[in-house]
Amino acid sequence: MGMYMDVHRGMKGITSAELKDAHAADAAIEKEEGVHFERAWADPESGTVYCLSTAPSADAVQRIHERAGHTADEIHAVPLMV
Amino acid sequence: MGMYMDVHRGMKGITSAELKDAHAADAAIEKEEGVHFERAWADPESGTVYCLSTAPSADAVQRIHERAGHTADEIHAVPLMV
């Protein structure tokens, strides 16, 4: 298990309700891949969303995001944290 | 005050000690701009570092990062969070 930061672009104008719905869609199925989405932050102006997760692999994170309908544009393992 | 996510690129091979030192350099002067760096995550393989902060503005975040010697490549206000 490791920590991952993934990035979604093209989400201009995303609302608080839409972010919550997207997170809920991930959370509903995340256990099937051993993923846990910890937090997500959104910038509606540039349309960027950052998701922090713990997961067995970046592929597992992507599979959950794809099935939830929002494929990530980048996924980075972030083994270092302060 | 708001939350900001900033991104640094080109940090390939960054170590845990280097991340801690960079964070400490920010923390030492952050109060002068009313900024607080909450967390940072690093991907040494791609050389990407993400910093989460609370701050009065993106410019305030950048001024601290510049003075600490590591200008951010992107800074996004992230008013939405789950």
Image (tube, coloured by chain):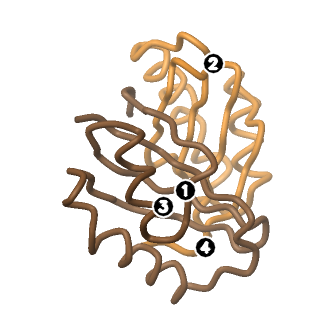
Chain colours: A orange, B brown
Q: Amino acid at mark 4?
A: Pro
Q: Are marks 2 and 3 on the same chain?
A: no
Residue at 56% from the left image edge and 25% from the top image edge:
A25
Question: Relative to A60, is B76 on the left or the right?
Answer: left
Q: Are marks 1 and 3 on the same chain?
A: yes
Task: Give coordinates of residue A48: x percent, y percent.
Answer: 60, 29
Chain for mark 1?
Answer: B
Disc with the residue nearer the chain's start (4 vs 2): 2
Question: Relative to B82, is A49 on the left or the right?
Answer: right
Q: Which residue is mark 2?
A: A11
Label 1 to label 3: alpha-carbon separation: 15 Å
Residue at 60% from the left image edge and 36% from the top image edge:
A29
Q: Which residue is mark 1?
A: B50
Q: Which residue is mark 3?
A: B66
> Which numbered tag is attached to residue A13?
none
Pick whichever, B25 or A17, lies toward us. B25
Chain for mark 4?
Answer: A
For the residue labelled by badge 2, is the local secondary structure a helix, a strand or a loop? loop
Depicted B56 relative to depicted B34: above or below: above
For the residue labelled by badge 4, is the local secondary structure a helix, a strand or a loop? loop
Q: Are marks 4 and 2 on the same chain?
A: yes
